[in-house]
Image: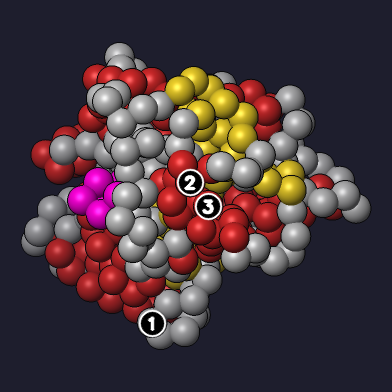
């Protein structure tokens, strides 16, 4: 089998993305792979490394140019992966406000990758193969980047079912789990306590879970948010479906910050990224921790090697 080839986008050039990407590469992840960077020329960190240039960056440039270069790097990486020139992509952090300043309407990587690849839907999964308790924790968001007041309207049985299918498929496809076990995290306190604190558990979760089980997907719940993640870290589930952003992200970043990896579900190729943002406040100081970027590289390589040895590289969700 040939060595996997991985494209690494450098993210917002004002942030720590270029720094952590290069530092992670200088301590090469195992197993070996061929790496190509995608980003602007003019960055000191990338001197001497293979770089696909998508423009030029200078210290006098502002947010609009940063957003444009960030988006162009992602578009280039997706084109390469779609054409088979690379086997996976790893993306350094971007700034959502810079994307908006450059005229892009996407709130983040997950939605941008969905539209660029043309898949029906993508999911945001933050995964740590080792946590503070020693066991894995993988959290998938049912609803993504949106105001909290919009979550109840977006949290539907159809949406929960779709995210469960994406999770089931990619835990099999990229992680190699034969029969993934999924746990549904409730929206309301105490899983609504038989309707005392809301009806989403009965109205949304229970019909979705019943339908998914009929499809042969191993899913259980809904469990209260204050216990479901501990259940997963004790080995009772391979992934937790969290109803909204912060209830899931707060837990996994507490349990595994620096080693967790963002994985986009539903794509025709693996995509990973570190679990942190642009960190403008420490950019350029040489103090950024590259451990999450290194974990993202290692995960992308593992997934790419699995894809290269799989007889069927297509997603079973193509017709969803």
The answer to which quarter of the image holds residue 217 is bottom right
Q: Which residue is mark 1?
A: 132
Within 10 Å of the Cα at label 2, are there few (<14), some (14-19), or many (20+) other Cα atoms?
some
Q: Residue 243: where, in percent of width, then height?
A: 29, 51
Structural distance between the alpha carbons of marks 1 and 3: 27 Å
What span is colored magenta in the figure? 278-283
Q: Secondary structure at mark 2?
A: helix
Q: Are marks 2 and 3 in contact (CB under 8 Å)?
A: yes
Residue in front for this viewpoint, 201 or 255: 255
What is the magenta segment's predominant secondary structure?
loop
From the image, tell me which residue sits under label 2. Answer: 45
Query: Is residue 161 among what the camera can see?
Result: no
Farthest residue toward the top? 103
Marks 2 and 3, how far apart in space? 7 Å
What numbered label is drawn on residue 22? 3
Percent across and percent down for residue 38 are: 56, 34
Residue at 65%, 63% (x, y): give it. 28
């Amino acid at each position: 089998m040939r060595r996997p080839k991985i494209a690494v986008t450098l993210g917002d050039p004002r942030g720590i993305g270029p720094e952590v990407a290069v530092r992670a590469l200088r301590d090469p992840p195992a197993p070996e792979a061929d790496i190509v960077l995608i980003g602007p020329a003019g960055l000191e960190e990338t001197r001497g490394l293979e770089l696909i240039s998508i423009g030029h960056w200078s210290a006098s440039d502002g947010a609009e140019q940063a957003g444009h270069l960030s988006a162009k790097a992602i578009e280039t990486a997706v084109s390469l992966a779609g054409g088979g020139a690379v086997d996976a992509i790893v993306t350094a952090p971007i700034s959502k406000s810079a994307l908006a300043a450059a005229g892009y309407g996407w709130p983040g990587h997950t939605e941008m990758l969905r539209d660029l690849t043309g898949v029906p839907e993508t999911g945001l999964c933050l995964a740590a193969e080792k946590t503070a308790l020693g066991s894995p924790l993988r959290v998938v968001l049912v609803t993504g980047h949106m105001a909290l007041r919009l979550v109840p309207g977006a949290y539907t049985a159809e949406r929960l079912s779709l995210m469960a299918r994406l999770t089931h498929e990619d835990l099999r496809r990229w992680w190699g789990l034969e029969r993934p076990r999924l746990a549904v995290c409730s929206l309301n306190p105490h899983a609504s306590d038989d309707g005392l604190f809301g009806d989403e558990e009965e109205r949304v979760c229970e019909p979705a879970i019943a339908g998914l089980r009929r499809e042969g997907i191993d899913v259980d719940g809904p469990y209260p948010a204050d216990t479901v993640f501990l259940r997963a870290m004790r080995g009772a589930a391979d992934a937790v479906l969290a109803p909204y952003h912060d209830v899931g992200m707060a837990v996994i970043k507490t349990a595994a910050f620096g080693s967790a990896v963002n994985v986009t579900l539903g794509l025709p190729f693996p995509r990973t990224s570190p679990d942190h943002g642009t960190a403008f406040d420490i950019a350029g100081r040489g103090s950024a921790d590259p451990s999450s970027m290194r974990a993202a590289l290692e995960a992308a390589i593992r997934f790419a090697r699995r894809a290269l040895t799989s007889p069927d590289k297509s997603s079973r969700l193509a017709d969803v």
